[in-house]
Amino acid sequence: MTKKRTIIMICGFVAFAVIAGFVAAQHTLAFDTVIRQWFYSIRSEQLTAVLKVITYMGNWQSITGLCLLLLIIPKTRTHYGIPVSSSAFFITLLNKGVKIIFKRPRPDVSLHLIEQGGYSFTSGHSITSMVVFGLLIFLVRKYVKDRRTANMLTVLLCVPLVFIGLSRIYMGVHFPTDVLGGWCLGLAVLMIIVSIEDRLTTGKEPKL
């Protein structure tokens, strides 16, 4: 693991630990309330329609479909499908474990714009989007040799990476600290995954 990735990984774990500590101690009310109120204040029929599409991009059905697509296509199977699918599976199990440990209730159901059950911390959509789309960005930058195409794909992949998490707050199904915790833990895990991927595939890059 490079020094830069090590620093990012440590910062991610530390930030997650701090957020988790505040959540466990129930000291996040003021922070969460201010941010939630702002998100709720900008709600509109048009924006809700757009963010529903974005939030559904982080559903397990959408992530599973993406993984299957990458696995089915021969050209993307080895270098994209296998690492993304295995990472999505791992991070899903990890997040379920975190949820069971903290057992944080979701915001009041009266605030929900979509149906959502289960525990709140951490946001599964946020942690999964960070790992899946973050890993895809890394793989695109590694394997796509045309820099213009790589840059365009990077920008496109950044949209779900960021906005899936934000949409969960807007939809009223998560607290801001759920999303932040998911991003931080996801980023730390992502650094481990890309380091492993680098070690396993260095010198085997195809020209796409």
Image: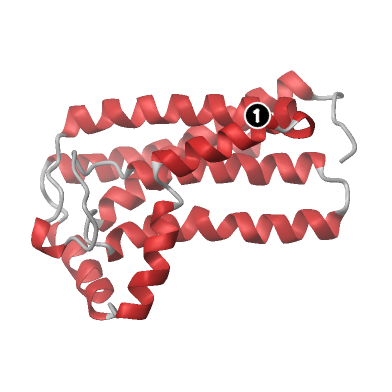
- Asked which quadrant contains residue 42, the reply is bottom left
Q: Is residue 137 left or right of residue 48?
A: right
Q: Amino acid at mark 1?
A: Leu
User: Residue 198: x percent and y percent?
Assistant: 72, 27
Q: Is residue 195 left or right of residue 93?
A: right
Q: Quadrant of the N terminus?
A: top right
> Residue at position x 18%, y 43% from top?
117
Q: Which residue is mark 1?
A: 71
Q: Answer above or below: position of 121 versus 47.
A: above
User: Residue 2: x percent and y percent?
Assistant: 67, 32
> Residue at position x 65%, y 29% from top?
71
- Asked which quadrant contains residue 194, the reply is top right
Name the colour scheme: secondary structure
Specify few, some or many for label 1: CA neighbours under 10 Å numbering under 14, 14-19, or 20 or more. Answer: many
- Figure disc tally: 1
Q: Answer above or below: position of 129 versus 73.
A: below
> Residue at position x 42%, y 70% from top?
50
Of 24 and 135, nearer the camera is 135
Q: Answer above or below: position of 9 versus 173.
A: above
Q: Quadrant of the C terminus?
A: top right
Q: Is residue 99 left or right of residue 83?
A: left
Q: What kind of element bears circle 1?
A: helix
User: Residue 100: x percent and y percent?
Assistant: 20, 28
> Residue at position x 29%, y 41% from top?
122
Is residue 9 at all visible to an observer of this figure?
no
Q: Is residue 23 left or right of residue 180?
A: left
